[in-house]
Image: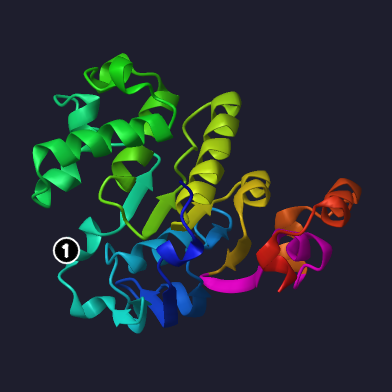
Amino acid sequence: MASSAASGSRVELRGVGVTYPGGSDAVRNVDLTVGAGEFTVFLGPSGSGKSTLLRTINRLIEPTSGAVFIDGVDVRTLDPVVLRRGIGYVIQAVGLFPHLTIGANVGVVPTLLGWDRARIARRVDDLLALVRLEPATYRDRYPRQLSGGEQQRTGVARALAAEPHLLLMDEPFGAVDAIVRSSLQDEIRRIHRELGTTIVFVTHDVDEALRLADRIVVIAGGAIAQADTPQRVLAAPADDVVRSLVGIDAQSREFAEARPLRSHEMR
């Protein structure tokens, strides 16, 4: 059953900055609100600060200025381990445990949280089915027996296992071929529709951002250049940096004019 958008968390970044030792600013004074249930994509070239900004949300990187709030709670007041167990996190290098079965990999966080075995088993099978991996076929296999795309699907299932209200995805599909990548993009949009989980997704691929996002946040030089719907980013880029990144041309303008508005874009 599809969940409502209320099942997702609201994320607020207030004046967030990250300065690395030596004085270089990776992120500069970012103010951003990600609404509950929103699929937000951080888009920018390599080195723009988008992954750094993502990692401030689950405290893998601590901001040197500003603060991050999830559902109104300052994440600095939470134990980092507890915080991260409540947030799904998917990266390009899936990081499945090679000595554990697929079922055990998916059930790692619920196990750490003390769920009973029957509940974990049900959750594992539900999630494998959700990511289109037949439970009877895949739960007892090992990561080495899966293709790259199947491993990525397992990574998504594992990230969702503890029923998080927030899912962070950092270039998750960058290591698979174009056909598999397209399939995975379709799956994550479907999962988002069904669960209503808030998703913050990092990519440098413009087509991927346009295909997935409710809202695109273009990041350049550690700062937000534009935060808007895909249609508006294409039709009215904020500056030359955004215009260059999204490659405004006749085809892009045709997409911008033809793309149907989603319900939240009409508000």
Q: Quadrant of residue 53?
A: bottom left
Kindly tell me whether residue 93 is visible in this rendering. Answer: no
Q: Residue at x 34, y 38 (%)?
A: 157
The vertical placement of 43 against 33, above or below, is above
Name the spot of residue 133 as percent of width and height, x first: 39, 24
Asked if one can make out residue 173 in the rendered structure from this viewpoint, the answer is yes
x%, y% of residue 19?
Answer: 36, 75
Q: Is residue 228 magenta?
A: yes
**Residue shown at the point (39%, 55%) measured from the top left:** 167
Given residues 225 and 148, the one toward you in this image is 148
Q: Is residue 56 above or below residue 193?
A: below
Report the amino acid beneath label 1. Answer: Val
Q: Which residues are magenta?
A: 222-239
Q: Residue at x 57, y 66 (%)?
A: 219
Residue nearer the viewer, 31 or 117:
117
Left or right, 45 with respect to 135, comes to right
Q: Is residue 172 above or below residue 266?
A: above
138 or 19: nearer the eye? 138
- 173 relative to 151 in the view: left or right: right
The mark total stands at 1
Q: Is residue 230 magenta?
A: yes
Outermost residue to the front: 1
Instruction: Pick the quarter of the image with the C terminus.
Output: bottom right
Looking at the image, which is closer to me, 172 or 223? Answer: 172
Residue at left offset 14%, top offset 36%: 118
Q: Few, some or many C-alpha atoms within 10 Å of disc 1 (few <14, some 14-19, many ≥20)? A: few
Residue 47 image point, x, y percent: 49, 58
Q: What residue is pinned by disc 1?
A: 82
Specify how the rendered protein is coloured.
rainbow
- Helix, strand or loop at mark 1: helix
Can you tell which quarter of the image residue 128 is in? top left
